[in-house]
Each structure stands twice: as C-alpha cells, then as structure tokens.
Image (tube, coloured by chain):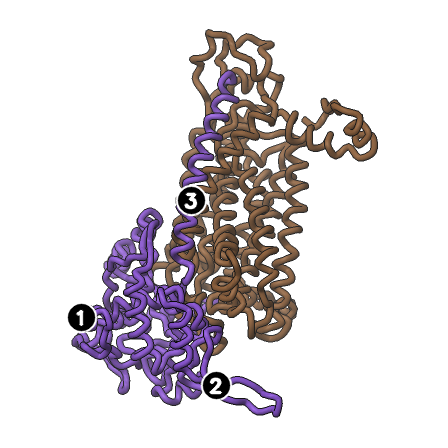
Chain colours: A purple, B brown
Amino acid sequence: MKKLLAALLAGGLMIIPAAHAQDKEGEAASPSPQAAAPAPSESEVTSNVAGDEAAAEEGEHETPHYPLKRPAELAWTFAGPFGHWDLQQLQRGYKVYKEVCAACHSMELVAFRNLEALGYSEDQVKAIAGDYTVTDGPNGDGDMFERPAIPSDHFPSPFANPEAAAAANNGAAPPDLSLIAKARAVERGFPRFVFDTVTQYQEAGPDYIHALLTGYGQNPPPGTVIQPGTHFNPYFIGGPALAMPPPLSADAVTYDDGTPGTVDQYARDVSSFLMWAAEPHLVERKATGFVVMLYLLIFAALVYLVKKRVWANTPH
Amino acid sequence: MSGHSSYVPTNRFMRWVDARLPLPRLVYDSFVAFPVPRNLNYAYTFGGILSLMLGIQIVTGVVLAMHYSGNSALAFHSVEQIMRDVNWGWLMRYMHANGASFFFVAVYIHIFRGLYYGSYKAPREILWILGVVIFLLMMATAFMGYVLPWGQMSFWGATVITGFFTAFPIIGDPIQQLLLGGFAVDNATLNRFFSLHYLLPFMIAGVVILHIWALHVTGQTNPTGVEVKTKDDVVPFTPHATIKDGLGMVVFLLFYCWFVFYMPNFLGHPDNYIPANPLKTPAHIVPEWYFLPFYAMLRAITFNIGPIDSKLGGVLVMFGSIIVLFFLPWLDTSRVRSAVYRPIYRIFFWVLVVDTIFLGWLGSRPAEGIYPTLALIGTIYYFAHWLVILPVLGLVETPRKLPASIAEAVLGPNYASGTAAGAAPPSGSVSAPENR
C-alpha cells in the first residue's frame, strides 16, 4: 500500500518521465535490442493481462525510465512567435553536418537547392553540389553512370542501403537526419505541456540533439549495464547507452567566421541546422502566423462591435 | 418551428425560381427567419464552429489529396514533399492535422454543452442520436487520416486498433482481414484507408444535414431548458445568431491558428516523423489525444470476466462507452432539462468532466504500475454516471423552480407581454437578472 501511494505521488509529480523509453531506429542501445529494452509486441499492447504482469514485474525491479536526465532548454533564435534563423549559425551547422555527421548519417529529404535558404548564392550552391558525386541513369546504352551533383539533386547517402549502414555500424543503422529534429523529443509531462501551449515551447527536438551530443563522457550510475560497443549517455531517449560514439570533439571543425570550436558550440550549431532541415518553412510559417493573428484579432474586434450593436436592444 | 414559411421573393427572377425549386426559400427559412431562443450563450455557437471546421477539413483535405500518394512506398515522402516543395503545402497540412484536433475540441464542447443543458431530452432524441452517429464517423475518419502519413505511430496505431476486432470470437478475424486487406497492415490497408478517409467526411456532411434538419423541426434548446412558447422568447436567426456564431468562429479560429502557425506539432507525436517500420515497435503506442479517454477504458479491463477474456472485455467497454450515449435520452429520468435548475446533477456533470479528462491523462500513461487500477476506477465511474446516477438522480433530485418562459427568465416576471422580439423592452425590465 505504501508503495502504491509512492507510485501515485511520483506519477502526480511526474518524477516518472515515463512513456518515452523508445527503442529508436538505429540508435538501438545494443546489437540485440531485445536485451536492452524489449519493445512491447502487439499482443502485449492489446492484451492487458500480459501488460499488467510485465508492469508489476517492472515495478519490482525499479526499471529506470529514459532518458536519465532531461535536456536543458536552450535559447534558440527560431523559438517564439518572432523566431528567425541565424544564417551564420545555420552555415556553421551545415559545416558540422558535412564534416562530421554526414560520414554516417544520410539526409535524403534535403536537396542542394534548399541550401540557398542558408544564405548561399546560386553559384555557391552549384559549387557545393559539384563536390558530390551521384549515380544517374540508365543512359542510352542502359548503363548507370556517375556524375557531379547539381542543385536539384538530394544529398547522397553515405551507405547504399540500410543493411549496409547497419553492417558498417555495429548492427545499428544511423538514422536519417532530415527529420530528426522533429522525430525526437523527451516527453514534457504534466504540467509542463500545459504551460507549453502559452510559451510556445516547440524546441524539444533541438534541445534533445544538443543534450545528446554534449552528454557523453559522464560516469554511469552504479549498476548500469553498458553493452559492449555502446556509449553511456544519460540524455539518450532509448536506453542507458547508444551505439553512436561521441561524434564531436573540440576543434574538430574549423569555422570560417572565427567562432570558437567547442563541443557545445558545434552541438548548438548543428542542432539549429537540423531544425532547419526538418522544418525549412518554419520562419515563413511564424511570419505568416503573425499577420494571420493580427488580422483575426482586428476582425474579431469588429465582429464583436457589430454583435453588440445587433443585440443592443435585445436583452438576452 | 418549421411551420409556416415567411419567405417573400423580392423580384421576378426569385419568384420564377421559387415556383420551380424553392431553394432560396429553404435557405431563408433555415438561416434567416428561423427563430432561435433569445437567451442562447456562447456554448451554443459550437454547432456553427463545427460546420466551419468540417468545411476547412474538406477543403484542405481535397488539396492535400492532389499531392498525396496512397502507396506505402511513397506515402511518407509524398507528405514530406507537401511540407517542403508544394506551395503553401506546409500550411495545408498543418491546417488539416490541427484541424482534426480542433474539430474534436469543438465537438467535445458541443457534446458537453448538450449534456449540461439536457439537449438530448424529448423531443430531441433523434437529433441527439444523429449527433452520436456523427461523432462515431468523425472518430473513424480521424483514425484513418492519422494512418495516411505512414509514420511509425500511423502504422502501429493502425495495427493496434484493427487488432481490437480480433477480440470478437468467430467473426473477429474475418473482420480484421477485411479491414486490413490482408493479414497485416500493409499497402492494401493504406489504400482502403485513403479511400474511406476521402469518403467518410461526405457521409458526415450528409448526417450533419439530417442533424440540422432535426434541429429545425424541434427548435433549439436554451439554457433554461424551457421550450419556446411565444415570439417574445425568440429572435430571428439573422442577424442575431449569425453574428454571434460569427464571433464564436473568429475567436475559435484565433486558438486554432495559434497552434497551426506557432506549435503545429504540439498535438502530434514525434514518432510519426519516423517512417513506418513493421519490424520496430515503438515503446509506447499512444493514439491521438482525442481518443485517450477511450483508450484508457480499453486498457482498464485487465482481468477475465467468465467467458469474456480481458481483451474482449476491454473492447466491449470501449465500444460500450460510446454506445451508451445512444440510450442517454431514456437513461436520464429527470423531467427538467437544464442543469441550471438541477443543483445535484450540476455537480455530477462536472465530476463527469473531470473523470473524462482524468481518463484521458491515464490513456497517455503506460499501462503499468498504478495506472490500470486508476483507469478501472475512472471507467467504473464513467459507466455509473450513465447507468446509475442519471436514472436514480432524476427520481430523487428536487429541481429548482423553472421560469414560466424564456422571456420571463430574461426580462423578469413583470415583462410586458406582447413586446416584439428584438424590440426595446420596457424600461423596468432592463435590470432583470439574466439567466444564462
């Protein structure tokens, strides 16, 4: 009974971040995902008896919920109703992506032409694309051939297919990064999610990426089992450790604008870049929203005045 | 209320039309001259808001369908193409996705308004039942729509929800296979869900017409629950209700646009930005927020009851939670409609609201620890409200004294009878207590 009450209290206070110990694609904690965090099968979800037994067991062993630590909420230029991109930052983030992330991660939904939104000129985009080689074809002879990329091409993937990606990365295919800033978020929990509707907090994705990239190198709590080939990171959403080794180190990327090359700076820049990649129309959306809200507010005021006039002599 | 028509064609052309197809007469009688109680508050504007939302969903949906590919290999990328490359595609998609949520926001307020003011009671039983039919169609449409982006939560939500049907003995498996077009969620499932997702909104529109027809036969209820008796009780729909509904719509759109433009993914799930993968089950499969109370009730049944195993029990409870609404007009035994005059019912009404929100929160929790037990308590209370509290309360509760008429409630007992609707009331009645 005491335990029941404690669980109730914990649930109410959201000490249990719950619900998000997700076995994420490619970030799988170990080559055999079943060992780390068995994902419930369909039958467990629909058949409640099995689920309940599993739950009771889970309570006994005090299974930790992931992530172990909540990401810090950073200040992003694109947050809030007047959010905008810091183009310098996006260009720096693109450089980090290109020189570090792209070695393993694809970004197949983004085309080179999209990079013009980062402030590059058409010629610069052509030059950037020209550095890549893509496979085209078949040509008139029926053969596939390689050619330099053009702006309408999408970023080529580092691996031929997911199987090759998994084989080269200890069995865990690195996830595509096109949408990663929207596909990862630590659950906010009550009452945070209620406040979020007012504060417009929508940056859980970049906050998570930043926290993950800067969260390596800490000591795991005693008793934590780290599978061989995985790396402890208390911010990882799917378990205590992930297959991706710490990708960033100080001065790994040389910025053209003289910004100091710290891991924190790299993480911020690449998180912003990935937010842009996931939501290229974000700023346009918010700017449109401002005009729409203004219009609706004025319209509402006018309709209210007409309504008042219509009902003026009609008690109701 | 749908008696004599007061429409008079104003010119020869309209007379000519009226003699052949009296459509302008129908519109005039339904949306201009139609008498509405003078004391309707803003809770009564949600019918109009819902019509607006249905319109927004159909228009944005038709545009999205022009760019969407209903094929499991292409669906996810076609949605991303809409988001990235289609002109204003992001706006269409976010309006549509959040439009579904706000459709449900509006319908839940609409339903609870009906519960509070007893709008389901005689002679409006069919009006209420049609409303429940619309609600069911909305749920089916929203569920199928959520599958179309073919993300992880689309795929696994479809797997879980179609799996409900396997709970039924003998007929369960064939029904599930018919829904899926195979033995698992796959391209055939996506194809038929797309087809049905396009069909059902027009069925909703059809039932909405019946719903409005039934409304115009019986007339609207009002916060007093007293039927309209004289023309002092009513005002013409236009301009009074038109402008009031219009204000309700614009304010509602403000909330809607807040989400569309500033936090379009708040009501969604991050996992749905991961392409569907039949080999990877998400750790927690959660439906959209508007299904959560029903999902909690499904999972609350963790034990077998005689021959009914826990899975079938959960499914029956979930379907039962909506089926019971069909019988509401006969379960509520009170002869007084409005909760304004039912002091005890009013308390139970708010407890039901809290219980439903509580169940919704439990639906978002994993089925572990204390949660299934709390869900069971919430579920028992939910059913007790309809099956025990309402029938008994009507017999034992002493209602407050009802006003003789709407006009009396609004204008006070001394209002001069014969005051034309909409005209200035006698000076003595201006300070009459309003009864909203």
Residue A297 at x, y = what percent? 42, 37
Circles 1, 3 touching at the beta carbon (< 8 Å): no
Task: Residue A87 in the image: state x and y as whole percent.
Answer: 31, 63
Question: Which numbered dot is residue B290?
Answer: none
Which-is-in-front pick, marks 2 and 1? 2
Q: Earlier in the sequence, mark 3 or mark 2?
A: 2
What residue does disc 2 label? Answer: A147
Q: CA distance from mark 1 to mark 3?
A: 38 Å
Asked where in the image residue B332 lies, by quadrant, the reply is: top right
Question: Which is nearer the eye, A217 or A124?
Answer: A124
Q: Position of residue A45 (x, y in %)?
A: 45, 68
Disc 3 crowd rating (10 Å Cα; few below 14, some 14-19, many 20+) is: few
Residues at discs 3 and 2 both on one chain: yes
Q: Quadrant of the N terminus of chain A?
A: bottom left
Q: Which residue is mark 3?
A: A291
Q: Position of residue A88 (x, y in %)?
A: 28, 64
Kindly identify which residue carries mark 1: A260
Q: Is residue A163 left or right of residue B172?
A: left
